[in-house]
Every structure is written in C-alpha cells, then in structure tokens.
Image (spheres, grey):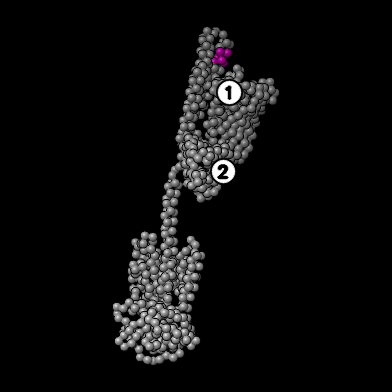
C-alpha cells in the first residue's frame, strides 16, 4: 500500500479531457498505466495503473508521487521531478520501484509525456510501464516461439491451442474454420484448461465470432456476455473476457478465426491480441497447405479412379523391376490388392521363368535406349494359371536429370481375339481333317459295302446253277458270312456316327458289370480258342461318364484281343483291369495274342488302317475307339511287339464333380 495516502479533493476526470481529445481514448483504454499530477498530487489514474499496483482507483487518487515510490528510490524520484521542473521536453523517464498492494513492489518506468496548462494551474501526464510485465511478456513470447518451433505438420492446430492456454494462463483457446455456406464455425481444435476437447460446430449469428470475421479483431477484456446476450454458450461457459482475431488466406478472404476466452477479466489484452496475430500467419499457411494437399489428393484420387476403371493393364516399375504403381486390372491378374504390389516384383506373384526373362529384357532395352517399345503380342500367366494375351507398350519416364525413373507399361488384353483366332484355326484344321476322313471314308465305305454285296450276288448266281445240294449248303454258309461282315461294318459306321454327333449323357459306371456283359456278348466270337478272361476293379470311388461310349471302347478292344489271340499259345488270356480315383479311371487291357509290328503302331488308330493283311475287319475299330476316348476327354496308348501280345492303356476323366 502507498505509505501516506492523503484524502484531498481532486479534479474530476471529466474536467481533464474534452470528449474529442485523442488522449481520452488512449488514457481510458490501455493496459499501460497513466496518471495526472498537479503540484505532486495525483488527481486521476487509469485502470492500467490500478492493475499494475493492484489498488483501487480511490486508493491512488489523492496521494502524491512520493507516496507511491518506495523509500529507497525517493532520491531518484526527486532528481526526476527537479529535472522535469527545469526542462520542458517530453518523454523524460526514470526507472523506480512503486509500492503496490501489501508489500508488493513493482519495477516501473515513469515517463513524463505531456503538460497541460489551465487557467488555474499546470497538469502533468505520466506514463507508467510495468517492466516486470514486460519481462513476463518476453518470457511468454520466448515460450510461445519455442512451442511454435516444435510444431510440425502433424496435429498443428491441437498443439497450437494447447500452447496458447498453457503459455497465456487462459482457460479457453480455439481455432475455427468458417463454413460460408452454412454460416457457421467448424471448430478445428479446442483446448479447455490445457486439455483438448472434442471439436464441434456452431452458428455465427449473435456471437462475437461473427463480428471477428467482419471486423478482423475483437478485444473485450470483460463483460462479453452483456455485449452478446444472444450467445448462450458465453453464459453456459461463464465467459467474461474474449479476444478473437480473424484468419485470412493469401487472397485476403476470411477463412476462420483464432479465439481465447476466460472466465475472468483478461488483463494484458493488447499483448495477447498481438500473440494471436503471430499465430494467424502460421495457421493461415497451414490451412493453405492443407487445402493445397487436399486438392492434390483429390486429383490423385481422380486419376487413380480413372486408371483403376481403365480395362487396360497399367503399371509402373523402377529400374529394379519393383512396382511403383499399378491399377486394379493388374492386381486382379496377379491375385492381390493393388496396394500390396508396391515395392514388389512381378515374379513375387507369378514366377514363370520364360515370361519373366522376356519382360526383363524388354524393360532393360527401354531403359538403355530411353525409347518406347511396342509389343504386338505378349503372353502372361495369371496367378490362377490362366494364360492371357496382351498388346503392350512400354515407355520410359525421365526425371529432371534425364534419367529413366519409371518404366510405364500399358497393355490391352487381346485374349478373346487370340482365342477366337486359335479356335478358328482349330476349326479349320478340324474341318480339313473331317473332309479328309470323309473322302477316305466314302471311298473305303463304298468298297467295303460293295465287296460283301458282290460276294453275295456271286454266291446267289452259283446257287441258281448248282444242282448238288451239298455245295448249296456251303454257298449258303458263305453268304451268311458276308451278310454278317456287312452287318458288322454297318454297326461300326453307326457307332462312329453316334460318337461324332450325340451329346454325352453322364451316369455312374459299373465297370465290372459292363465288362462282364461285353465278354458275354463275345462268348462265341472265337469258339475254337479257349481264353482266360480276368477282370480286376480297384477303387471305391463312384465313377461317372458316358456309358455308351465306354461300351463301344470295351467291345472293340476286347473283340480284337479275342479275335487276334495266338493260335499257337497254349494258355491264351485277356486281362482287363480298372483303377478308379476322384479324378480319373485308368483302364488296362492286356493280352498275349499275335501282337502288332512296331512299324504299324503310329498308324493303328487311323481310319480304315489294317495292321495285317490277315485282318478281316474294316479298319474302323481302333479309329472309333480313339474317337470315343477323345470325346470323353481321355487319352489312349498302346505297347505291343509282334508275337508278344498287346497292352492298351486308357485314361478317362471322372465327371463325378
């Protein structure tokens, strides 16, 4: 407390200033201390000086300058006052210690700023700077600067509001983004009592924030609720002091604001406002950076969507062969997510050496020559094993130094076209084969049909002329043989027609019963020779296939085994074994008959081919067997030597699934 307060009458405040005097605003609305002295008697003091000394106004008015100064600094004050008395210049100052509330001492700078003469006396105006507060402010600025330096690109807004509430010892700090369309503020970050809170949004109408956006700055040390009675949040939060500064982009358009608020009067408001303005520069830059990055991200996403929706394969690789980008088409072919491709190589997913080697060679050539390469036809194998055909262009993308940084590949899939071309070629080849076989068939069929008929007609003429009944019986036997031969040939033609034209009808196959029936139908086929017939079936799995074709296969092979048994072999046999699993059935028919000369083996499945002149057949049997096997998706092979018998092996797929 001042040590000798005098209760003297003083000149009222209104008599010191006129309403238009610029000093009145400066005097009333400043955190810096001002006082008016008349003959060493303090006749007025502003709120700034009251705050510095922590005294009420009526505790200061009526005292002298000497009353405010501590005893040790009175000599300095006297020298200062005497200097003022001898000189008329302004801005003379002295640093002294003033006595505040209790035993509190405040280091201040006392400066004479103006003298005003009236009819009665002379009034002297003094400015009092709180040097202790300046040091505090310097410390705050230092801490704020240190805090700003630590803020990187992550959580910028959150760190800023935390920094403000902590350094300024203020309860609320928030950063809001202006949503012009909705006329609202979207809180980007808010700190309450040094703790981050969940962001929210609020309408601008009737709030001080609305005026901040329009006027750039609002400073209200206290009484903010009375100034904005419609703002319920101010009342709910018990806000007394409010300082807000607008945020602007590089074009000068308002994009938001930064606000600090407290439940008590905000002292040092001008200083805090200047701090907020320092923050706005960084915040505006950060928002501009975010906006720019979002624009780039949106463009990248748009470009990625365009690339991903493109039906072509589009991907980039570095010189190591590692993916730097790839669209969804590439990912689907390799059987992975497109993000999982980055940093990996093609062979990490589909390792087909010949394809990888070819791909590397082409890409190395692109890098070496720095020129694009077109590949009219490129084969790749998918992760699923499916082969695809592509029409590809590989081009180099250069960096600023002119070096190849990325090999960009764009491939359009032409698999349907290639498959169609291959199918057409296959159809043409098949058509040529059919035409050749048809020509051959017509020629041989006409011969094999006419030969029995000619024999029958010859025997009929002989019967007409023959008188001996014994010879007649021989002729009738020969006629019967020719008719049976003709009938067998016609049956073979019918079998071939059925195989070529009929659609398969799949059903479970009872191999044991089927083979036994075929053996029974051939019981009298070679009655002169007794053969050992053996059937061996392995596998409990159900086998599903086309029964009619399997009967044709078994009848032809078993009849040949019986027909061409070795007449000089004492123990002739025909063994038939079948081994079944989930995927296939393997049928082996083995005999120890006459066998087939090795020179005939490559052609025995050809139409009308006879391996021996002794053959009485049409030459269609094995051809029909091969056609039936291939119709079922299987394959047939034979091992034989002349005089050593023959072994036929047939593999047929199981259509159980």
User: Which residue is denoted by mark 1 in the rendering?
Assistant: 603
Q: Residue furthest right?
A: 570
Residue located at (55% from left, 25% from top): 623
Determine which quarter of the picture holds residue 273. Answer: bottom left
Q: Secondary structure at mark 2?
A: helix
Please give the range of residues in magenta. 474-479
The correct choice, above or below, for 192 with respect to 128 in the image is above
Question: Is residue 142 visible to the viewer in this orientation of the structure?
Answer: yes
User: Which residue is denoted by mark 2 in the rendering?
Assistant: 347
Question: Is residue 239 visible to the viewer in this orientation of the structure?
Answer: no
Residue located at (47% from left, 41% from top): 410
* Residue 614, magenta (yes or no): no
Q: Secondary structure at mark 1?
A: helix
Quadrant (top left, top right, bottom left, bottom right) of the N terminus: bottom left
Quadrant (top left, top right, bottom left, bottom right) of the C terminus: top right
Name the chief secondary structure element in magenta. helix
In depth, the one of 241 and 469 nearer the eye is: 241
The correct choice, above or below, for 285 with respect to 624 in the image is below
65 lies left or right of 407:
left
Determine which quarter of the picture holds residue 563. Answer: top right
């Amino acid at each position: 407390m001042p040590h000798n307060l005098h209760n003297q009458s003083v000149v009222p405040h209104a008599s010191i200033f006129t309403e238009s005097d610029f000093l009145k605003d400066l005097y009333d609305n400043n955190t810096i201390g001002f006082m008016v002295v008349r003959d060493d008697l303090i006749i007025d003091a502003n709120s700034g000086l009251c705050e510095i000394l922590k005294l009420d106004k009526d505790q200061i008015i009526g005292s002298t300058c000497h009353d405010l100064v501590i005893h040790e600094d009175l000599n300095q004050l006297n020298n200062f006052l005497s200097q003022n008395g001898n000189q008329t210049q302004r801005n003379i100052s002295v640093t002294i210690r003033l006595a505040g509330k209790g035993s509190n001492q405040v280091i201040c700078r006392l400066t004479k700023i103006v003298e005003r003469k009236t009819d009665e006396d002379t009034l002297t105006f003094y400015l009092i700077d709180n040097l202790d507060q300046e040091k505090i402010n310097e410390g705050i600025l230092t801490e704020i600067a240190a805090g700003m330096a630590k803020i990187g690109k992550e959580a910028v807004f959150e760190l800023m509001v935390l920094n403000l509430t902590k350094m300024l010892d203020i309860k609320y700090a928030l950063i809001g983004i202006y949503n012009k369309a909705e006329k609202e503020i979207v809180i980007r970050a808010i700190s309450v009592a040094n703790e981050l809170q969940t962001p929210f949004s609020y309408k601008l109408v009737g709030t001080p924030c609305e005026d901040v956006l329009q006027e750039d700055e609002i400073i209200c040390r206290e009484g903010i609720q009375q100034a904005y009675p419609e703002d319920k949040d101010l009342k709910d939060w018990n806000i007394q002091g409010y300082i807000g500064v607008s945020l602007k982009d590089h074009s000068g358009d308002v994009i938001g604001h930064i606000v600090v608020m407290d439940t008590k009067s905000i002292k040092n408001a001008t200083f805090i406002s200047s701090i907020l303005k320092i923050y706005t520069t960084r915040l505006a830059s950060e928002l501009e950076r975010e906006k720019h990055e979002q624009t780039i991200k949106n463009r990248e996403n748009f470009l990625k969507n365009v690339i991903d929706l493109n039906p072509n394969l589009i991907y980039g690789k570095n010189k190591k062969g590692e993916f730097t980008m790839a669209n969804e088409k590439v990912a689907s072919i390799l059987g992975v997510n497109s993000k999982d491709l980055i940093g990996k190589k093609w062979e990490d997913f589909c390792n087909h050496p010949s394809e990888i080697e070819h791909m590397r060679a082409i890409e190395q050539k692109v890098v070496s020559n720095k020129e694009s390469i077109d590949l009219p036809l490129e084969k790749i194998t998918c992760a699923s094993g499916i082969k695809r055909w592509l029409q590809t262009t590989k081009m180099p993308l250069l960096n600023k130094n002119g070096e190849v940084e990325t090999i960009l590949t764009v491939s359009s899939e032409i698999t349907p076209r290639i498959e169609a071309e291959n199918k057409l070629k296959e159809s043409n080849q098949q058509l040529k084969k059919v035409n050749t076989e048809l020509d051959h068939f017509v020629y041989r069929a006409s011969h094999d049909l006419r030969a029995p008929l000619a024999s029958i007609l010859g025997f009929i003429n002989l019967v007409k002329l023959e008188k001996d009944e014994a010879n007649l019986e021989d002729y009738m036997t020969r006629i019967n043989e020719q008719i049976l031969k003709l009938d067998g040939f016609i049956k073979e033609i019918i079998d071939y027609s059925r195989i070529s034209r009929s659609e398969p009808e799949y059903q479970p196959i009872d191999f044991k019963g089927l083979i036994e029936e075929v053996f029974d139908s051939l019981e009298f086929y070679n009655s002169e020779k007794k053969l050992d017939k053996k059937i061996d079936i392995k596998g409990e799995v159900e086998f599903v296939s086309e029964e009619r074709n399997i009967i044709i296969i078994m009848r032809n092979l078993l009849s040949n085994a019986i027909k061409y048994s070795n007449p000089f072999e004492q123990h002739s046999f025909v063994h038939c074994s079948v081994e079944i699993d989930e995927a296939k059935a393997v049928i082996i028919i083995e005999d120890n008959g006459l066998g087939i000369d090795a020179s005939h083996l490559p052609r025995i499945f050809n139409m009308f081919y006879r391996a021996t002149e002794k053959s009485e057949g049409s030459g269609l049997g094995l051809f029909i067997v091969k056609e039936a096997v291939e119709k079922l998706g299987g394959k047939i092979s034979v091992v034989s030597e002349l005089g050593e018998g023959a072994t036929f092996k047939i593999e047929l797929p199981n259509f159980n699934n």
